[in-house]
Amino acid sequence: MKNTATIILNRNLPDVADKLYESMCKNNADKTDIYVVEAGSDKSKLSKYCTWWANWDEAMKHGLRVARGVNYALSQLLSEGKFSNYNYFFMLTNDAEFEDKPVVDTLVEVMREHPHVGILSPCSKQWAEAKLIGEDNTKYFWYVHNVAYMMRREYIESIMEKDNPDYMNFLYDGTNFRGYGLESELVAKGYINDWATAITKKVWVSENEEYLQKLAGLIKTETYEENLNLYLDEGRKWMRRKYGYNSRWEMQMYTKYFYEKFFEFYPELKEHRI
Amino acid sequence: MVIEKLKQFMSNRRCTLLGVGPMSKNCVDAAIELSNDYEIPLMLIASRRQIEAQDFGGGYVNGWSTESFAEYVKKNDRKGKIILTRDHGGPWQNNFEKEQKLSLCNAMESAKKSFRVDIESGFDIIHIDPSVDIYGDLSIDETLVRIFELYEFCWSVAEEKKRRIFFEIGTEEQSGTNYNQFDSEYVISETNKFCKKNNLPVPAFVVIQTGTKVKETKNVGTFDNPVRIKNELPAEIQIPKILDICNRNNIFLKQHNTDYLSDETLSWHPKLGIHSANVAPEFGVAETLAFIEILKKYRLDGLVEKFVNLSYGSKKWQKWMLLESKAGKMEKAVIAGHYVFSEPGFGEIKECAKKELQNHSIDLDGYLKTKVKESIMRYLRNFRLVGRQ
């Protein structure tokens, strides 16, 4: 029985998604089932490993992005009766790249060593967080960049939408389409519900930004610059609408507050604090 | 009792203290007037290139020496609100020591001479920054040895002159990258040990790189950037971590290169608990822009052209340029403007401008000072040193 579901989000880059799928398969096939979400891809550009194709009008027009894509995958697993089969969900965007070795088992091992961790992210060699983590390999953070998140099922269950969860609300708030600020919200919700967020150096991930920078037309998305501006603008509006926050710093301090509180309740975990 | 006053002030009002670079006489006057009008402490943070001892020939700002600058400020600061601060004091921190390629020994002696005049002239806060070495890179431990030698020297001068001074340490160059926090903590802890062993006061301020970096007329560091920058700690992690270090060590953070940060980011300084921040070139640029604007408004285009040629020709803009700069001659002249305010050529341009503007009942310096004040006020409001309305 495989205890991990790996979810790959893709849009119009079948070769890229196939390559990631195959590399995950090669190194982790005995440890994880792999699902590919086609987020509004053209019919001719579906990955050969496509599991679910989000092809309703809006998805075809705008795609799903991470928030709606993950929500959609989790909704599908739930409706297919598979959600509770898994203890861990490993969410990947198609631009994630790993070393050529098993990663799922290593991440699961870290999850087992850290039973209070709800979200676990591999570290990137391009993140200075690696220096902060030092020799300990795994530390708890209040801010984690979203490239590859492994999430614990109990964590998801503690914060997920309970009434008819769907692609808009299963886990992430899908009203924030491009997702600026959503990681912080998930991290905060985690600490509020006794779940930490960690980065581990036991697995390294990198984000190949070239796809977004050079293949925007192919993906059928805005240019990198346009997308960035919309990402920030929409995210700021979302923060203000939902929380009354006028700055990303308010979101950060909100998250950090619950991070600090967490260690008041779990002083034995302070060694993992940065 | 400057630090006690600052601590008292901050305990009554959650704010971030401001250090103002003395970019020009108008800038100094603006700072003095605002601090007196609003009854708030302001630090005037003079680099050695800006303000230097008479024996070194003074600095580039208004022809002031350390002695005459201090005298001028004390005379005009009626309510005693200005805190005279030496910024980046240390060997090879002025042009003379670099140009003469002084040896380490001579550069240290020269720096001591400069510090002595600072202390004798009434400077309250002394930033000891021996991070520059024209002969090669320094290890942290080598830097610490130099800090300790200068620290002890400054304290002995202060004792001799019966002056109470406070120290700022920190070996930051404006890299805009996240300064290694472990190094910063090590510098603080080693300095504290040294002070304890030698019965010296511990430093009051530390400079740690928070992710600010000034290029052209922008802040291009990580602090104001909501998007991840490669090989950097996100500011969301960096800033609280640095403040943890400072608070744990009971030392104020002095953020350098704060210029041009957005209002949103500035307004978060007091909320985040950033104790103090230095701003310099932005105020010089504000005055330069105002000067050009008023000349243009009254169609004094010939004077604009002369000024732009003078400023651009100074090449003082060079160190501020981005690698892939798109700035033209005018933008470069704006960046370098305040460096030429004391040059005879500028004096002539300004005299002509004054005469012309008098015909329109405009007091040029009054106008420029008002514009610099507006620029400083952006910080005073965002730092909650004055009411935000």
Image (cartoon, coloured by chain):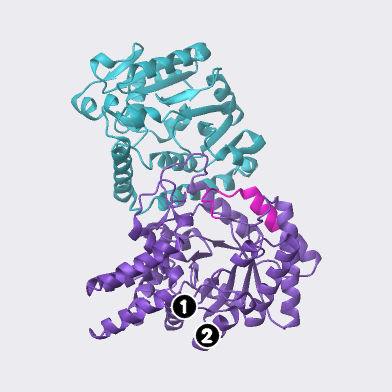
The colour applied to the residues of chain B in this rendering is purple
Label 1: few (<14), some or many (≥20) within 10 Å? many
Q: Identify the residue position indicated by label 1 in the image.
A: B28
Q: Residue A249 vs residue A51: left or right?
A: right
Residue located 77% across and 62% down the image:
B194
Q: In which quarter of the image is residue B47?
A: bottom right
The foreground one among A177 and B152 is B152
Which percent across, then down, holds residue B9?
53, 75
Across and down, in percent, residue A190 comes to: 47, 39
- Residues under numbered marks 2 and 1 in contact, where contact means CB atoms less than 8 Å apart: yes
What type is the residue that disc 1 sits on? Val
A191 to the left or right of A80: right
Q: In which quarter of the image is the C terminus of chain A?
A: top right
Q: Give the range drawn in magenta.
A: B174-189
Q: In the picture, one chain is cyan; tell me its letter.
A: A
- Residue beneath disc 2: B72
User: Does label 2 or label 1 sit earlier along the sequence?
Assistant: 1
Q: Is residue B27 magenta?
A: no
Cα separation, mark 2 vs mark 1, equals 10 Å
Residue occupying the point 23% across, 85% down: B359
Q: Is residue A115 visible?
A: no
